[in-house]
Amino acid sequence: MTNDAKKNPRPANRLAGETSPYLLQHQHNPVDWYPWGDEALERSKAENKPIFLSIGYSACHWCHVMEHESFENEDVAQFMNENFVNIKVDREERPDLDDIYMKATQVLSGHGGWPMSVFLTPDKKPYHAGTYYPLVARYGQPGFPDVLGTMSNAWRNTPDQVEERAEKVLAHVQQLTLSSEHLPDLGPDVERPQLDIMDVAMEQLAQLFDPQHGGFGGPPKFPHGDSIRLALWQHAMTEDPQALRMAEHTLDCMARGGIYDQLGGGFARYSTDGEWAIPHFEKMLYDNALLVPAYLEAARMTGREDFSRVARECCEWVLREMVDEAGGLWSTQDADSEGEEGKFFAWQRDDVLSLVGEQNAQLVDICWGLGLPRNFEGNSWVLLRPKPDEELAAELGCTQGEMTARLDALRPLLFEARDKRIHPGTDDKVLVSWNGLMISALASSSTALGEPRFLAAAQRAADFCLTVMRPDGKRLLATYRNGRAHIQATLADYAYLAAGLLDLFEADGDLRWPRAVRELCDVVREHFADSERAGFFFTADDHEDLVARPRDLEDGALPSSNAVMLDVFHRMAHLTGDLSLRDEADRALAMLEPFMRRAPSAFSRMLLALQRVAAGSPTVVVADGRGADALRAVARSASPPWGAVFEVGAGSASGDGVADLPLLNGKLGRGDAATAYVCRGGTCSEPVTDPNALIAQLGR
C-alpha cells in the first residue's frame, strides 16, 4: 500500500508529475504547489513574489496534520497562491535543500523539525522559518494564516529590511555549513588524530547515558546505532566494561520497548518517552540499517542470541515489506493509518485474549505489558516487554526458553490478525543512499546469521543501484519510483553505496563490487572533493547553484557521508594499494580533529573510521579449499569488529581477476587445504591452514 493521493474531485496541481509519494499526497491541494525547480524560481523573480517553501516527508505525522488543517483549506490556499510562489520538497529526495534550510530554520526559530516552513526571497535566501504552524494559534505557536499575512506584508512593505535580515541569516547558514574559510588550513605534512580521542568520546557518551533505560539523552529518545557501535568498539579495543554496559543495556532496553515491533520486527524512528515505550510509529529503512550492525556486533561480543534474533527480524521485515519488484528497497512506513497515529499497532486486551485464549492471559499480561495500565491513546496498549526476560520468566515460574517458546507460538496469531487491519502507507520510492546502508546490514547479516536470502536481497539491491540508478555507467541518480530514476546524487549516495558494496564483497567475494567502488571513488574525487582544504562537499561541482554548498561532517539521523567516504577510502587503500586514497582520508581526519575533540559524540561514524585505520585493522584473506568453513568461522569470530575477512576462490588468486587488488593477489591455498593470511598495513603473516594458528595470529 502506497501513499499516492486518494481520489479527489479537485484538479491536480504541478505535483502530479512527481515520483515522491510525499509530493503526490499534495497533488490535489488547492495550493498552487510547484516542485523545486527553475519554473518556480523564475516565476518568483519575474513576479517579485517571495517563496513559501514547505519541506517534509511522507511518514511525518505533523506534515499530515498541517496539510489537512491548512493546505486543504480553500481560504488559506487562496492567500498563499495570491501572495507567494509555493514550493513543496520531499526532504528525503533533496537532502541538500533540507540541510541548508534546516540550518536556517534553527537560526531563525531556535529549533528544527518537520514540516519545515521557510519563507525565501526570490533569490532563495531565507528570511523567516518555523516548523508546524496550526491553523489557529495554539501550542504557543501563531496561526498559519497570521504568519502568512505577516511575511507577505514584510516583503511588500519593507523589502530592504527583509533583504538585510536574509543576508544575515545566510551568513550564519554558510558558517554552519563549514565552507572552506571556516576550516583550518593544513600544511603539507599532517597526521591523523590519535586514538585517545576515543576516551574523550566515551566520557561524553557516559555523561549522556541513561543508566535506567539506556540510550543517550532524554525524550524524545532516538536510537543512535553508531554511538552504540562506538561503545562496542571501544570495549573490543580496551575491554572497558562501562562501554560494554552502555551498549548492551541500551540495545536490551530498545529491543524490549514499544519502539521495537514485537510482532513484525523493525524499529520505529524514535520513542516519545524516555523509556522506549511509546514510539513515533514510522519505520525508516535507514534506522533499521544502522541498528542491525550494532545488534550483530553485540551478539558476537556477548553471545546473546536475543540480539541476533532482533537483527534477523529487522532484516525479515525488510524482505517482507520493503522490497521493490525492480530490486531496490523502499524508504519508509507511515506512522498513521485511517488518520490516526499508531492505530495499526495498538491493541485492546480483550482482542488479544480472543486470539490467544484466556489460558494465556497471565503470559501476555506479564510478557507484553497487558496487565499494566494502558499506555497509549484510546485506552489501548502498545506491546512491549516491561522487564528483562529472566525477570519475566521468574514471574511466570518457568525458564526463559519455555517463556520464549510460548510467546513464539502466540506471536503469529497476533501478527496475522494485525495484518488484516488497514496498513499504514508505505513510501515506495527507492533512495540509493538508504539502499547502500541496508545493503551493508543485509550483507553482514547474511554471514553472521547464515541466511542466504539476506545476501540475495543485498545483491539485487546492489545490482539495481549500479544499473538502473547509474544509467550512464558512471554518475548516480538519487531516487527512483515506478520506473523513473532522477535527481542528481549527493555524496551520501556515493558514500553509503560504496560502503555497502565493500561489505557485500566481504560476504560473497564477487569482484564486481570492489571494482564498482573504485569507479564511485573516482567520481567522488572528481566532483565532490574540496581542493582548498580536505574532505568532500555534499553536492557535486556541477550541482545546481544553491545559496550554500553544504558539507556533511557531523552525524545526524544519518551518519556523516564524509565519515563514510573516508572510511571507504581507507578500506580501498588497503585493498588496492592506492596510498593516495589513504593520504586523502588522513588529511581530512586531521582537519576535523579539533571539531571531533570538541564534540566527539557528534562524530561517531568519523571515530569509527578513525579506529578502523588507527587500531591496525587486521584483514584476513581466506583462500578456498578443504576446511575453508572452519577458517572463515574463526576469522569472523576472532577478528575485532573493525577487521575484514575476504575470500578468494580456488585458483583465482594467481592473478586472474585479482591483479588490480594486491591484497588478494597471490593468496593461494596450500595444496587442497584452505589457507588464511592475516594482513596488517602492508604486511601479511605466514599462511596458515590450522584454525588454532589463525586464532594465535589474530591475538585472541
Image: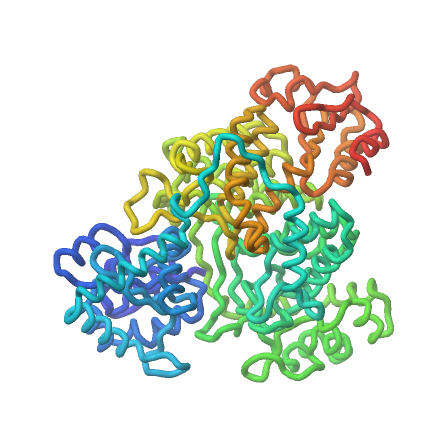
Q: In the rendered view, does 336 fall on the left or right side of 548?
A: right
The way the protein has been coloured in the rendering is rainbow
Tell me residue 42's x, y (percent).
Answer: 17, 53
Answer above or below: position of 372 versus 10. Answer: below
Q: Quadrant of the C terminus?
A: top right
Q: In the rendered view, does 545 fall on the left or right side of 461?
A: left
Answer above or below: position of 37 versus 59. Answer: above
Q: Is residue 479 visible?
A: no
Q: Residue at x 64, y 35 (%)?
A: 506
Tell me residue 327's x, y (percent).
Answer: 49, 44
Front position in the image: 116 or 668: 116
Q: Residue at x 64, y 59 (%)?
A: 205
Front position in the image: 153 or 335: 153
Q: Quadrant of the N terminus?
A: bottom left
Q: Is residue 183 visible?
A: yes
Q: How many marks?
A: 0
Tell me residue 93's x, y (percent).
Answer: 39, 52
Q: Residue at x 56, y 65 (%)?
A: 270
Tell me residue 38's x, y (percent).
Answer: 22, 50
Front position in the image: 613 or 341: 613
Q: Residue at x 24, y 68 (%)?
A: 31
Front position in the image: 547 or 319: 547
Answer above or below: position of 428 versus 152. Answer: above
